Image (tube, rainbow, N blue to C red):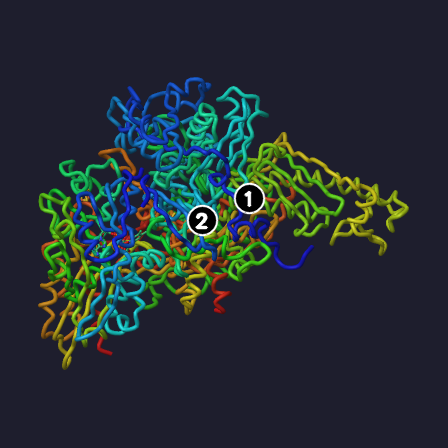
Amino acid sequence: MSDDGRIALSLTLNGRALDVETPACATLLDLLRDRLGLTGVKKGCDMGACGACTVLMGGRRIKSCLALAAACDGGAITTIEGIGTLDDLHPLQAAFIRHDALQCGYCTPGQILSGIALLAETPKDLAAIREGMSGNLCRCGAYPNIVAAIAEVAGL
Amino acid sequence: MSGPAFSYARPADVAGALAQGARPGAAFLAGGTDLIQLWKAGLAAHAELVDISRLPLAGIDLADGELAIGALARLSDVALHPRVMAEHPLIAQAIAATASGQVRNMATVGGNLLQRTRCAYFRTQGMACNKREPGSGCGAAAGETRQAALFGASAACVATHASDLAVALTALRAELTILGPDGERRIALPDLYRLPGQTPQIDTTLAPGELIAAVQVRRAAGLAARSTYLKVRDRASFEFAVVSVAAALRLEDGAVVEARLAAGGVAPLPWRLAGAEAALIGRAPDARAFAEAAGLAVEGAQPLADNGFKVELLRRAVIRALETVGATA
Amino acid sequence: MSPGPVTRWEAGLKVTGQAVFAAETPAPGLLYAVLVEAPVGCGTVLAVDAAQARRTPGFADLISYPEAQGLKPSSVTALIREPTIHFAGQPVALVVAENLAAAQAAARAVRVEAEARPAIAALGQALDQAYTPATAGRNPAESRRGDAARALAEAHLVVRRRYETAVNNHHPMEPHAVVCCWEGDRVTVHTSTQAVFGARAAIAHAFGLPAEDARVVSRFLGGGFGCKGQLWWPWMMQAMLAARRTGRPVRLELTRAQLFTLAGRRSETVQELAVGLDADGRLTAIDHQVLAQTSTHGEYADTTAGVSRWLYACPNVTTRHRLVRTNEPQPIPMRAPGTAPGTFALESALDEAAAALGIDPVDLRVRNHGDHDQEAGRPWSSKRLLECYRVGAERFGWAHRPAAGAAGDGRWRLGSGMASTFYAQHLQPSRARVRLAADASLVVQCGTQDMGNGAYTALGQMAAEALGVPMSRVTVELGDTLLPQGPISAGSQVTVSISPAVAMATAELRAILAQLAVADQASPLAGQRPEDLDFADGLVRSRTGNVAEPLADLLARQAPAGLEAEGSADLPQVQTHSFMSHGAVFVEVGVDPDLGEVRVRRVCAAFAAGRIVNPLLATSQYVGGLIGGIGMALHERTVTDLASGRILGDNFADYLIPVHADMPTFDIALVHEDDTHLPGGIKGVGMLGTAGVQAAIANAIFDAVGRRVRRLPIRIEDILGHPDPRDGFETLT
Ligand SMILES: Cc1cc2nc3c(=O)[nH]c(=O)nc-3n(C[C@H](O)[C@H](O)[C@H](O)COP(=O)(O)OP(=O)(O)OC[C@H]3O[C@@H](n4cnc5c(N)ncnc54)[C@H](O)[C@@H]3O)c2cc1C
Ligand code: SF4
Ligand code: FES
Ligand code: FES
C-alpha cells in the first residue's frame, strides 16, 4: 500500500497485463467502470443482488460490485469488452441477437458473461439453465429468450 | 450510503492474519459478499480489512472418517466437490440453494456461517435496531414480523440467521476449528452463535481476532442416502429461506436408528430440532411418526403478528422433508 | 422485404457492451454527486451545515435550498427550492466531489437540522382525509352510467368483494443518471429519461434558458416503465446547478435504494367492487370504488376503475377514485397503470361469478362482450377480443383442462385460470426525418427514446420498408433534442405516433425519386409513370413492366448529395372512435398446498393490437409485460416502516422480482387486427401484457387449491391456513 492509501495491482484484463492503483475501498466494479472506462460492466444494484456487474475472474463468474479491487490483485478478468466485437461476435452474443434475448440491454452484458460461465458447467436442461441464471435479473423480462439463446449454444 | 473509508491489508500467512486481525477496528475479509454489502449500506465501519481469502485454509479433505472443509473454501468448490456430493449431499444441496452462481463463486464457508441477519430493519439505515445500534429499539418486533424468529428471540431482537449451509451443518453435527492468539479450539457449530438476549449486537462467541479455520463433519455413512435440504421460499430461486429444513435419517430393519433435523429461518441461529430427532428413534418411518416429530419441532414456537404461518409451515416442511428421506420404496 | 425476422436494430451494440448509457458518457474533469437525505420523514429543514463537509478531501460544492433559489418555481423545482420534507429519504442537498468515494465522505459529513412534524406513514392512518381528485390518469375520477345501486339491488347474483394490491416500484435495471456539462449559458444533459423534449422544456423553464440552449440526450435507456420522467428531474437539476457553479461536468446516479423513493411507484389500491349479473351471466351492474395513495407534494391517481367502464358491456356502472395523502413517495404511472390493479379486481370477481353461475369463465366474458365503447358512446376503431378468447383458449387447451382441483404433478396441484386485458391507445404529435445517401443507405431520425421497447427497430423498419432498403443499410438516431421532436416513451404510444411522420417523410422521398427516375434518360425507368413505380429490395421498379434499377444507381446520378425529407403528424381534431388494444391471458399454475409455494408453469396469451410491425419484438414486449405482471401477482411489495416512514428492505434481496427460475413457458398469439382509424393501423403493445395476468394467476390458484386470494402479492401465507368459508371450497386436503 502506498502512503495515500492507494494499492498497486497487477491484473490481466481481457487478456492484457495491466498495472493500476486503486483506493482500498474501491470495488472491482468501480475500478472497471469508472476508472478504466469499461462501461460494458453495468451497475444495477451495487449490492450483489442483480448480476448486472457480472465479470469473469479466472473464468468463473463473480459480482464485481462485491469484490474489492485490491483483493483481485493478480487475477485474470474478462468483461464483455473481451468477449467479442461487432465483427467477431461470441456465439452466445450472436445467439442473443437472433433470439432477441434483450430489450433495454442494461442487464445484457451480465447475462452473457453469466451464460458463458454457465455453459462451461454444461447445464443438462432448460431448468438447469433457468436455475443457473437466476442471479441475473432482467426487469424487461427477456428471460425466456435468454434461456433459449443459451440453450441453443449449449446444443440443447 | 457507504460507510467510512478503510485500509486494506493482505497478510502472507495465518500468523500474520491473526496478528493483524486482533488490532482494534480490524475485520477479516473473506469473499466479501456480506461484509462489502454491509459497508456499502453504511452498516459496517471498519478501520482496516484484513484479507484472508488467499490463506491456505481452503482445502476440502476427506480422511479418517471426517470431512474437513477449510473455512476459506468457496461455496461453489464445496458444492461441486465429487466426494462432498456423494458423501454429504446435504451440504451440496444447501449450498446449491444458496444465493446465486456468482455469489457462490466468491463466498466462503466461514463467511457464510458468519453472515449477519437479513432482518430488513437491520439492513436498512435509519430504522431502529438494537443489533446495529444498541438501545435504539427493535424495529422489527414493533413492525413487520414476517421474517421474525419463532424460537430463541428476545424482547430486544427477533431476527433470524439466514445461512442455509449452517442449517445443513447443524443437522450434521459439524464442529469448527477456531484459531486465536491463544491457539486452537474446537466447538460444536451451534456454539458459535449466541442467543440475542439483551445484547443482540454480539452475534457470535468468537473473541476479537479469532479466525475460523475449518469445519469438520464426521463421516455419517448411512445418512447420505437419506438426506435432504428443503428450502421454502416465495421465489423459485435466489432468495433467502422463508423456512428451511435439513433432514437425514438412517434406517435399520425398517426402523429409524439415527435422525438429524435442523431448521432455518426460524431462530437467531440454525435451530436443531432435538426433540423431533429423539422422537423418531426406534420408530418406523411412517406418517404418524413424522407427524409426531413435526409436532415436537414446533413446540414452544412463539409467533408474532405476521409470522404465525411459519409455525404451520415449519411443521409441514418437517413432514415433507421426512417423507422425502423416509420413503421406503 | 428481407426474409426471416428482423432482429433488434441496436442489438449488436448491446451484446458487446458498446451501447453507452447516460452515466457512462465520457466527460473529462467529471465531478461525482451524491444526494444527502433528510433526517426526518416529515417536517422542515432549518439548516444544512456543510462546514465539515467542505473540509473533506476532494469536496467541490454543495447545492441545497439557497443555491436553488435562482430556479423558477414550478412543481418540478419545488422539492429543491422549498425546505419542506414530504417523505423519508427526500434529498435536502447534493454534494459534488472529485470522485464518488470523496462525495460520499463529504455527504456523510453534512449536518442537517430539521424540525420534525408528525407524519402520515400509511394510507390507513388518514382514511378520514380521503378525497376525490379531479382526474384519475387522463380520465374523470368519477363516472356514472345508468343506476348501479338499483341494478345491484335487483341482480340475480351479486359478487361484492374487496381487493387489495401492494405498492410496486418500477425498478428499471439502469438507475437514473445524469452527466451534464455547461458551456457558457448552454448546457448538454445526458440523462436517462423517457422524454428528452419534456426534460428540455423543464430545464429551459427552470433555468430561464431558450429551449435551444439546452440539449438533452438519452440514446440508450436501461428500462423506464414510467419512472424516468419528471420525478427525477429535480435531482437532475440539482446536479446541473452544481455543474454550472463549478464549471465542470457533474455526474449523479441514483442508488438502487433511491429508486424506491425518488422515482415514483405504483400506488397500493384498496378496491371495493360489486358486480351484479342476471341468471344468464350478463352484467347488469358494476360499482367500483378505488382508494389509493398520493404524496403530500404531488397528486396522481391511476384510472384503476377504468376496467369497469370499458372492458364489458354493462348498462349500469358507477366508478370512483379517491386518494389519501401520505408522507410517502409520489406515485406515477407504472407498466399498465390502472389496468393492472383494476383487471385484478374485476377479472377475479368475474371468475367468482362464473363459478357461482356454473358458466365457463371464457363463455361468461363472451356473453358480456362490449361491441362499442359505452362510456364514451363511440364505436371501437377495432376490437378483436372475441378472437383473442377463441385463439387463446384453443392454444391453451382450455376446453380440455382438468376439473378444478383434479390435476397434480408430484407435490404440485395444478390449476388453470384466465382473464382479459386491455389498454387504451392514445396518440402524440411527432416529427421524423429520413435521409437517403447517394449509396442508398438510410438515416432515420426522431427525438423519441428507446427504453427497450424497440423504437430503434420499429422506426428503422418503417422507413426501410417504405423505401425498399434492407435493414442492414439503415441507421437510426434517437434520444436527442437536436433531432426532430418525437413522442415521449409512455403508454405504448411511440410506434403508432411516429408511424405517420415516417410515412409522410418516406412518401415525399418516394415521390421525388420517382420523378427523378422517370425523367432521367439514363434510367431504364425513363418514361414510366411515377405512380407506377415501386420501391423494394434496393430497387426502384415498375409495377407494370419488368423494368427496374438499383436505387443507388439512380441516386448516384440524380442526387449525389443525397435526399432528405421530414414528416410530421398532429393529433386528429375530432375523435370519432375509441382506440383500445385487447388480449386474453390463460395461465396454468402449480401450487404446493402444504408449503404454500406458487409457481406459474404456463402462460398462453392472445393479443389483438392492430398491425404488428415486428412480430419478434412484439412478442418480446408481451412476454416482458407478462413477467412484470407475474411479479406484481406473486412477489412485489414495497413496505413503509410505520415508525420511521422509511422503505423497509430497499434492495433487490427484499423487493423480489421474478428471476429466471420463476419463468413459465410462454405461448404468445398475435391476433391479426385491421384498424383503418389509427395511423398505419398500429396500436401499442407494451402495456397489454402487464395486466390481466394477475387475475388469471389468482383464478388459477383457486382452480388448483380452492383458495381465493384477493390481495397482491399472493404469498406463502395466503395459501396456508384455513380457507375463507365464503370461498365455498373445502374438498382438498
Ligand atoms: C444477493 C445475495 C444473496 C444471498 N443469498 C443467500 C442465501 O440464499 N443463503 C445463504 O445462506 N446466504 C446467502 N447469501 C449470503 C452469502 O452466502 C454470504 O454473504 C457469504 O456466504 C459470506 O461469505 P464471504 O466469504 O463472502 O464472507 P465475508 O463477507 O467476507 O465475511 C462475512 C463476515 O465473516 C467474517 N469472516 C469471514 N471469514 C472468516 C473466518 N474464516 N474467520 C473469522 N471471521 C470470518 C468477516 O469478517 C465478516 O464479518 C446471499 C448473499 C448475497 C449477496
Ligand atoms: S430483530 Fe434484531 S436485527 Fe431486526 S430490528 Fe430487531 S434488533 Fe435489529
Ligand atoms: S450491481 Fe453487482 S449485483 Fe447488482
Ligand atoms: S433487457 Fe432490460 S433489464 Fe434485461
User: Residue C42 appears in which quarter of the rendering?
Assistant: top left
Callout 1: few (<14), some (14-19), or many (20+) C-alpha neighbours within 10 Å? many
The answer to whether residue B192 is visible is yes
Is label 1 within 8 A of ligand 4 (CB to nearest ligand atom)?
no
**Would you name the residue on which mark 1 appears?**
C684
Q: Residue at x 38, y 34 (%)?
A: C262
Is residue B56 shown above or below C27? below
Residue C401: x and y in percent read: 42, 64
User: Front-most of C173 and C628?
Assistant: C173
Is residue A108 shown above or below C579? below
Give the alpha-carbon distance from disc 2 to disc 1, as whole Å.
Answer: 32 Å
C44 with respect to B182 (left or right): right
Callout 2: few (<14), some (14-19), or many (20+) C-alpha neighbours within 10 Å? many
User: Residue C284 appears in which quarter of the rendering?
Assistant: top left
User: Front-most of C517 and C146?
Assistant: C517
User: Front-most of C111 and C645?
Assistant: C111
Q: How many marks?
A: 2
Q: Are marks 2 and 1 on the same chain?
A: no
Disc number lying in front (2 or 1) = 2
| Residue type marked 2 | Val
Element type where label 1 sits in the image: loop
Label 1: chain letter: C
Label 2: chain letter: A
Quarter of the rendered structure image containing ligand 2:
top left
**Would you name the residue on which mark 2 appears?**
A41
Residue A153: x and y in percent read: 50, 65
Element type where label 2 sits in the image: loop
Q: Quadrant of the C terminus of chain C?
A: bottom left
| Residue type marked 1 | Gly
Residue B281: x and y in percent read: 10, 72
The answer to whether residue C291 is visible is no
Q: Residue at x 73, y 38 (%)?
A: C564
